[in-house]
Image: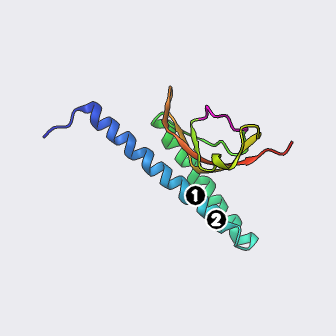
Amino acid sequence: MNTPPELAANTCEASLIDIVVETWRLSRTFQRVLTKLDAGEAARYQGQLRFFLKRLEEVLAAAQLRIVDLEGQAYDPGMAATPLNIADFGPEDCLRVEQMIEPLIMGTECVKRIGTIMLRRANL
């Protein structure tokens, strides 16, 4: 059975986004591991990671996609990200994005995948 081209394109894009999210997670884990290495060894692997992330950005740009990092930004309920710990705060709290759990993926004109975040109270 033949798959319509628009459905095939959507499936390919969804698959690419899934692998990008998993790759992003792996790169974050790799960054944490680098902090446990001695400085000389860590520097070599840090260079490889930078090259890999640059290459990932290039591939995403070719697909008209990009990863948006919200860490450190003031939290806005309209953000395209789901806060996992929003129930820990009151409506009067001023919040910031402490950690991205899953990245936000943007296309040229719209959000392709909503991110997942952890919040913290902002230091005033």
Residue 82 x %, y %: 57, 43
Measured Cα–Cα span from mark 2 to mark 1: 11 Å
Residue beneath the point at 63% across and 43% down? 69
Q: How is the image coloured?
A: rainbow
Residue beneath the point at 71% across and 64% down: 43
Where does the image place residue 20, in percent across and percent down from the top left? 48, 49
Which quarter of the figure is the N terminus placed in? top left
Q: Secondary structure at mark 2?
A: helix
Does the magenta-highlighted stretch encompass residue 46?
A: no
Task: Report which residue position mark 1 lands on.
Answer: 27
- Describe the element under mark 1 as helix, strand or loop: helix
Within the image, what quadrant is residue 80 found in? Answer: top right
Q: Mark number for residue 45?
A: 2
Q: Is the residue under label 1 in contact with that under label 2 (CB below 8 Å)? A: no
Identify the residue at image location x=28%, y=37%: 8
What is the three-letter code of the residue carrying label 1?
Answer: Ser
Report the front residue among 121 and 36: 121
Q: Position of residue 50 (x, y in %)?
A: 63, 54
Q: 113 left or right of 82? A: left
Q: Residue furthest right?
A: 124
Count all numbered tags in the image, as a single digit.
2
Q: Is residue 80 left or right of residue 98?
A: left
The residue stretch that appears in magenta: 74-79
Quarter of the image with the C terminus is: top right
Residue farthest along the top direction in this orientation: 109
44, 37: nearer the viewer: 37
Which amino acid, by three-letter code, is at mark 2? Answer: Tyr
Identify the residue at horizontal 50%, vertical 28% (top origin).
108
